[in-house]
């Protein structure tokens, strides 16, 4: 918290909202569906690519803010498995932006002890993109601060299917297929976010009321926060306001008493770390 206050102008709205936060009740894991780049561009009569380019700064800001707040995991939905349906030129723009972001930011991730993870079917990405991502993941693997999960070619359903298949394959190799019993703990331990807390706060920009196949398992008890702000306009104040709104929610996890922070037995912090990518 102090690390964030140190960079905010005292007296500013951001400073006041940050100061009002309860450091003991921060979300352990924030997920963001970054939406509205296309509409942001259209409103300015610009090509869609301009909206995606303008979306890089809120990515940097969100990573820095979560790291300075001491949040444990941040997952950003950068490219869904369904986004391949977009025109090839738009998909290529997104790869170029990822290349630009990684090229510029890995040093910053290292300085700030941030560990990058790539979640999704990374093996199906263009070779150059995959290699750069894998290098960035490897370079930051020893960092112990914020875990930044970039969801790329990601599908929540595919992730669950892959986890089930991994359990089946392991049991088959161990000659124990006939005794295989899948439970919540074993399944969660094969997800790409294994070892990380479930999502506490899920933010979606641009006002759409959809989950869009994002972290289906991990958001079971997430608090949802939808803002009409388009992603390129999502600034630090908007993020801090989302966290402040989260802190006002009563989280009961199906019970009747409010619980502050996720109950560990509900799937948080279970499992073993998954593969590096
Ligand atoms: C959704 O807006 C946004 C995306 C599919 C891409 C997100 C990409 C970025 C924020 C660029 C930078 C990312 C990284 C990780 C460096 P949309 O295009 O669906 O918007 P629309 O619904 O208004 O058309």
Image (cartoon, rainbow, N blue to C red):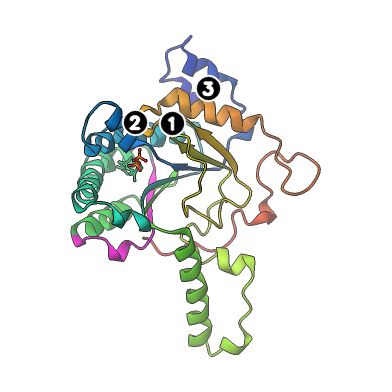
Where is residue 135 shown, x and y percent of the image? 26, 55
Stretch in magenta: 113-127
Q: Quadrant of residue 154?
A: bottom left
Q: Secondary structure at mark 3?
A: helix
Judge left or right: residue 137 versus residue 166: left
How packed mark 3 is, by other alpha carbons closer than 10 Å (few <14, some 14-19, many 20 or more), is many
Report which residue position mark 1 lands on: 65
**Separation of marks 3 and 2 at Cα, in angstroms:** 21 Å
Q: Looking at the image, is mark 2 or mark 1 nearer the viewer?
A: 2
Say which label, 2 or 1, has the lower sequence index. Answer: 1
How packed mark 1 is, by other alpha carbons closer than 10 Å (few <14, some 14-19, many 20 or more), is some
> Ligand 1 quadrant?
top left
**Separation of marks 2 and 1 at Cα, in angstroms:** 16 Å
Q: Residue at x 53, y 57 (%)?
A: 195
Q: Is residue 239 above or below residue 139?
A: above
Report which residue position mark 3 lands on: 18
Q: Which residue is the extreme one toward the right?
A: 256
Say which label, 1 or 3, has the lower sequence index. Answer: 3
Image quarter (top left, top right, bottom left or bottom right) of the C terminus: bottom left
Q: Secondary structure at mark 2?
A: helix
Report which residue position mark 2 lands on: 232
């Amino acid at each position: 918290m102090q690390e964030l206050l140190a960079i905010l102008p005292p007296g500013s709205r951001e400073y006041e909202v940050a100061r009002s936060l309860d450091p003991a009740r921060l979300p352990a894991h924030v997920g963001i569906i970054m939406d509205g780049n296309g509409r942001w561009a259209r409103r300015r009569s610009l090509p869609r690519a301009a909206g995606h380019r303008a979306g890089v700064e809120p990515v940097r800001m969100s990573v820095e803010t979560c790291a300075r707040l001491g949040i444990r995991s941040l997952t950003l939905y950068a490219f869904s498995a369904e986004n391949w349906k977009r025109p090839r030129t738009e998909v290529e723009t997104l790869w170029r932006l990822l290349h630009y972001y990684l090229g510029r930011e890995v040093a910053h991730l290292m300085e700030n002890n941030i560990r990058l993870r790539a979640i999704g079917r990374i093996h199906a990405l263009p070779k150059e993109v995959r290699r750069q991502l894998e290098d960035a993941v490897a370079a930051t693997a020893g960092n112990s601060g914020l875990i930044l999960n970039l969801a790329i070619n990601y599908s929540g359903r595919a992730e669950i299917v892959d986890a089930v298949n991994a359990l089946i394959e392991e049991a088959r190799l161990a000659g124990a297929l006939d005794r295989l019993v899948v439970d919540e703990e074993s399944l969660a331990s094969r997800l790409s976010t294994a070892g990380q807390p479930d999502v506490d706060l899920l933010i979606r920009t641009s006002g759409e009321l959809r989950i869009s196949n994002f972290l289906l398992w991990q958001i079971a008890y997430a608090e949802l926060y939808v803002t009409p702000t388009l992603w390129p306009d999502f600034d630090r104040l908007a993020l801090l306001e989302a966290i402040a709104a989260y802190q006002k929610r009563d989280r009961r996890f199906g019970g009747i008493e409010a619980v502050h922070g996720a109950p560990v037995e509900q799937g948080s912090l279970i499992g073993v770390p998954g593969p590096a990518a």
